Structure formats: C-alpha cells, structure tokens
Image (tube, helix red, strand yellow):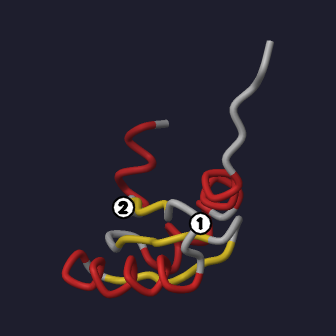
C-alpha cells in the first residue's frame, strides 16, 4: 500500500499548536516543502500565494485557515 505524504501538510500538522497560539483566526501559506511563506488575514492571501508561487514555482502552496484556540478545543 502506498501512503500519501505532502511535506507542506506535515509542516502544518507539526506546527499547528504554535500557529494556533500565535496566529489563531488568520490564514497560513506554506510552500517549498515545509517553508512558511507567511501568515495573514484573508485579504492578504493573494499576496502571500503569489509570493509562494514565485519562490517555489513547481510547488502547490498549502493555504489553510488557522483555527482559534477555542475552535480547536471544541473539536477535541
């Protein structure tokens, strides 16, 4: 059986607690196999995504919302 592994997803998962603590309610853009491009509000996503595509044109950037601490606690 072949398993799916995406480095950008792995970075997000590994750093989720710190992202929630520091940037909950914002968005994150990760590209280049585990490189944090930036964190910002939804209005900043286009700028961050363009930056990611310029730096890593062969990579598909991960763009994801960062849950707030209370949202994450509800899930658990």
Other residues around mark 1 within 10 Å, as few (<14) / some (14–19) / many (≥20): few
Is the residue 15 above or below the residue 1 in the image?
Answer: below
Identity of the residue furthest to the left in this view: 43
**Rendered location of residue 58, percent (x, y):** 59, 66
3D distance between C-alphas at marks 2 and 1:
23 Å
Please report the residue visible at 47 percent of the width from the left and 77 percent of the height from the top.
53
The count of marks equals 2
Q: Position of residue 44 (x, y in %)?
A: 27, 85
2 or 1: tag closer to the N-terminus: 1
Relative horizontal placement of residue 7, taking residue 57 as reference (left or right): right
Residue at the extreme right: 1
Residue ID at (80%, 12%): 1
- Which residue does the numbered mark 1 point to in the structure image? 58
Determine the residue located farthest toward the front in the rendered image.
Answer: 58
Nearest to the observer: residue 65 or residue 31? 31
Q: Nearer the viewer, residue 1 or 69?
A: 1
| Quarter of the view holding residue 49 | bottom left
Q: Residue at x 34, y 74 (%)?
A: 26
Image height of 74 relative to 1, above or below: below
Which-is-in-front pick, marks 2 and 1? 1
Q: Circle 1 sits in a helix, a strand or a loop, which is it?
A: loop
Per the rendering, the mark at residue 65 is 2
Residue sitting nearer the eye, 52 or 28: 52
Please name the residue shown 35% across and 51% down the image.
71
């Amino acid at each position: 059986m072949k398993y799916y592994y995406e480095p950008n997803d792995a970075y997000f998962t590994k750093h989720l607690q710190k992202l929630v603590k520091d940037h909950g309610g914002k968005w994150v853009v990760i590209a280049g196999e585990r490189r944090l491009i930036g964190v910002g509000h939804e209005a900043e996503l286009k700028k961050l995504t363009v930056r990611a595509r310029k730096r890593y044109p062969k990579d598909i950037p991960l763009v994801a919302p960062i849950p707030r601490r209370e949202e994450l606690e509800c899930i658990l």
